């Protein structure tokens, strides 16, 4: 039996995607820009956390615990609101949800530049997480409406992957010297201003109408004699039943591995003893590796349809490489394992897992299901990873053991995704 018995999509052939002039620019390009700014907003605290700690008074013995709380506060709001954002896609025009949430997370980011207490910092970081969590599922509702199955890995990569990893690759590289030169407060003001003054007007002016309206119109056309189409129900079976649980678990381990590294990479790199002047570039290096590897992996996935095996290899191979960090004492080798592990894992897994989810799910379940996947996966996995790495750092004085544990967890996620690919329905 082949590893991925259903390489191309759901059991019945999908209807062609509706026509939209310049859809790759109006949807893919705009959402790439929006997620780019969103990821700068969610990762910027990692760049400035030491100076934030000095200004707000937790730079001593309290640093490990308080910084972990501050960094993961975003993920608390993110976990909760992904579910809300997913179900809102069935009620409200996705375009205007996107507009409202960009305004919300940008304003919270801007206000962080004025905080004078840890409580205010944590509250606003939760706010950033809430708005970005509602934002997230709308991207895949757009993808389901406007791109067909043969385009889905490329669409997923453009909408979600490139915005995310360009922000991480360029963000640490650019924000580190900016924060060092001007301070952490101006960094937050600038990023919040970009969202409010650039992304918000672009979305309001150029994003197309609600995907939900497209899906409803298509359903109405499919009913003979002009009858009313029955409203599809959101059930456990519509999500895929128990195999959906395997998909969620695989993304939970992805969230642990990704956020366990991303939250701490600006703090991990200085422990290797490299020159301080290159720490920003080295913090960006794992994401630059990821961007280089994504193009061949994306082409391979769309040409072969073997998205499942490629995504499985991302978790397993990346997990093995990260699991080896604790067993070597060489700083250069540890850094190389982090770069290769995170780079391959994200390039192979991230674009393909969303292409798999979006093509497997019926249109009415895409928003809620992707909200659940990302809420539990990125939100829940990130919170657990932040607490785990922080606890192991406090106990051992090193990040190495925490990274290796995250690698072992990712291997389990790869096995869960392997089982999911075996349970996917065969093509009609």
Image: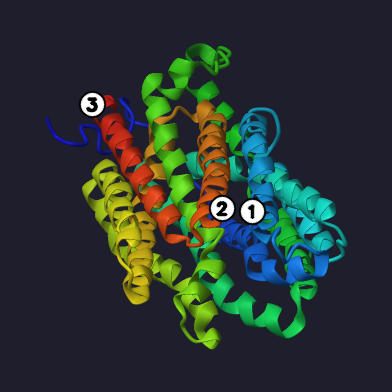
Viewer-proximal residue, 3 or 140?
A: 3
N-terminal-most mark, 2 or 1:
1
Residue located 47% across and 53% down the image:
258
Q: Element type at marker 2?
A: helix
Q: Element type at marker 1?
A: helix
Image spot of residue 38 (x, y percent)? 64, 58
The circle drawn on residue 68 is 1
Residue located 33% across and 71% down the image:
336
Q: Which residue is mark 2?
A: 390
Confirm whether residue 22 shows in the render. no
Q: Residues within 10 Å of mark 1 (few under 14, many from 20)?
A: many
The answer to whether residue 253 is left or right of residue 27 is: left
N-terminal-most mark, 1 or 3:
1
Q: CA distance from mark 2 to mark 3?
A: 43 Å
Residue located 44% across and 37% down the image:
358
Confirm whether residue 117 shows in the render. yes
Q: Which residue is mark 3?
A: 426
């Amino acid at each position: 039996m082949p590893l991925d018995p259903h390489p191309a999509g759901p059991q019945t052939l999908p209807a062609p995607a509706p026509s939209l002039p310049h859809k790759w620019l109006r949807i893919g390009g705009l959402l790439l820009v929006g997620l780019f700014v969103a990821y700068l907003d969610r990762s910027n605290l990692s760049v400035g956390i030491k100076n934030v700690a000095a200004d707000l008074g937790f730079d001593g013995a309290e640093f490990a615990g308080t910084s972990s709380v501050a960094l993961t506060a975003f993920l608390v709001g993110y976990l909760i609101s992904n579910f809300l954002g997913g179900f809102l896609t069935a009620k409200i025009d996705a375009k205007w949800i996107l507009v409202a949430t960009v305004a919300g997370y940008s304003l919270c980011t801007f206000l962080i530049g004025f905080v004078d207490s840890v409580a205010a910092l944590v509250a606003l970081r939760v706010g950033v997480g809430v708005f970005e969590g509602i934002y997230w599922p709308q991207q895949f509702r757009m993808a389901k409406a406007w791109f067909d199955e043969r385009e889905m890995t490329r669409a997923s990569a453009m909408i979600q992957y490139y915005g995310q990893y360009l922000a991480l690759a360029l963000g640490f590289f650019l924000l580190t010297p900016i924060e060092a030169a001007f301070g952490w407060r101006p960094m937050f003001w600038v990023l919040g201003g970009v969202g409010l003054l650039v992304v918000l007007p672009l979305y309001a002016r150029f994003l197309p109408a609600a995907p939900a309206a497209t899906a409803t119109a298509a359903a109405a056309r499919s009913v003979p004699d002009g009858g009313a189409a029955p409203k599809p129900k959101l059930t456990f079976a519509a999500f895929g039943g128990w195999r959906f649980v395997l998909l969620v678990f695989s993304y939970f381990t992805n969230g642990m591995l990704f956020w366990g590294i991303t939250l701490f990479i600006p703090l991990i790199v200085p422990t290797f003893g490299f020159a301080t002047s290159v720490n920003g570039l080295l913090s960006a290096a794992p994401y630059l590796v990821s961007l280089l590897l994504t193009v061949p992996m994306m082409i391979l996935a769309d040409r072969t349809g073997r998205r499942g095996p490629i995504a499985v290899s991302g978790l397993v191979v990346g997990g093995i490489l990260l699991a080896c960090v604790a067993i070597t004492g060489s700083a250069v080798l540890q850094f190389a394992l982090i770069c290769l592990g995170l780079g391959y894992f994200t390039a192979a897994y991230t674009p393909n897992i969303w292409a798999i989810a979006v093509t497997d799910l019926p249109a009415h379940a895409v928003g809620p299901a992707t909200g659940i996947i990302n809420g539990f996966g990125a939100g829940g996995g990130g919170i657990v990873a932040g607490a785990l790495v922080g606890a192991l750092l406090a106990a051992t004085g090193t990040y190495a053991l925490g990274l290796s544990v995250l690698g072992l967890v990712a291997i389990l996620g790869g096995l869960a995704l392997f089982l999911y690919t075996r349970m996917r329905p065969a093509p009609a």
